[in-house]
Image (spheres, rainbow, N blue to C red):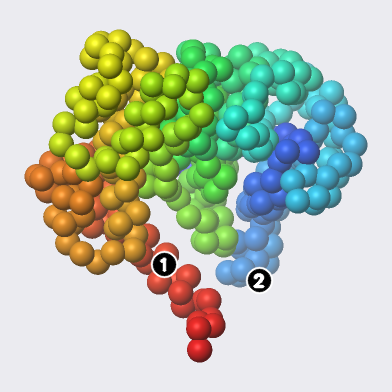
Amino acid sequence: MQNMTDASPASDRKPLILLLATPETSASVLYGLFDVLSSVGAVFPDMVKGAPEKELLDVRIVSADGRPFSCVGDVPVRPHSAIGDFNTRDPAPDAVVVSDTYISVTGVPTGRYPRECAWLREMHEAGALLSSVCSGALVLADAGVLEGCEATAHWAYRDMFRRYFPKVAFRDSTALCLKDQDRGVVTAGAVFAWHDLAFYLISRFCGYRHAVETAKVFLMNDHIEGQSPYVVMTRSMTVKDAIVADCQSWIAENYEVENPVERMIGRSGLSARTFARRFRAATGYAPMDYVQALRIEEAKQELERDQRPVEHIAAMVGYEDPASFRRLFKKRVGLTPAAYRKKFQRLSTLASATVPDLRN
């Protein structure tokens, strides 16, 4: 999270933040953001002094037509307004948050929200900060406001961005992308990165002190290590290139062998250059990058459940040099193998402590 100095609104008007919701929005993001942002300035003094103070942000839920609807899980949503109630004059929003809008990784992300996209472009041109959580970045991308920008969303949408929005520099390892905040766009990663976005928005519009106090009230957690520790390798086995598909199936069972790329090339019957070109076109990976990603994914699973030395796990997945394995693992995952094991085995311990043992 970005460290910001205290700030205060320039006038008595509260900063206006609109939460754009659709039937594909998850209630946890929408109502989590609404509860946290609406509480800024009021709840913390009530908890520590027993005397609430005034709320500092004007937070409203909006939708295309403003009518009640149900979001994911059949949770009811009653928007405060339709997007058409806000224009470039008064009341112009200071920020718009596009809540997550779930879509399958095999879906088509374009043309789903034409009214919302047109309105988002208008708000952006008027100077509003546009932000998103998770798949909400796909809506911003479809609106065209992310072209030439760096952006993030849930890591699983990496290939979708590459395919449909090649002019967006997608950062699947980032939890909160602030690279282009000066251009009026900020994007957050997977669903619970809304915590990071909320902290940023509170810091920006109310000051760092209020952001910290709000985090203390809600036990908000940052994702300073980014999304990398959570990323799972996505590898479609339904590629149209039969030769590449055959090599994918083979390497999935033989990822630990020596010279894996040479063996796949031999299996394919293609020249090294042609194989590399076709493999990248089909999978989005260079062949060796694919092998390394597959090996690291297997190593992660071993570290999550196994206490054997890192050197042993490195050898299991095809690395004779443990130091080399550690460097590659840290580069791809953002944590050392030991730190990754500690993080996810801690979660495993928590799960086992809360689930009763039914074997007896």
Identify which residue is drawn at 65% across, 71% down.
50
From the viewer's side, name the closer residue of 305 and 272.
Answer: 272
Task: Count every numbered label the image shows and give the total.
Answer: 2
Q: Amino acid at mark 1?
A: Ser
Judge left or right: residue 38 versus residue 214.
right
Identify which residue is drawn at 54% across, 83% down.
358
Name above or below for residue 35 compared with residue 120: below
Residue 249 position, x and y percent, is 38, 35
From the viewer's side, name the closer residue of 306 and 123.
Answer: 306
The residue beneath circle 2 is 50
The residue beneath circle 1 is 348
**Image-quadrant location for residue 331:** top left
Residue 33 position, x and y percent, is 65, 47
Name above or below for residue 248 compared with residue 46: above
Q: Amino acid at mark 2?
A: Gly
Judge left or right: residue 154 versus residue 91.
left
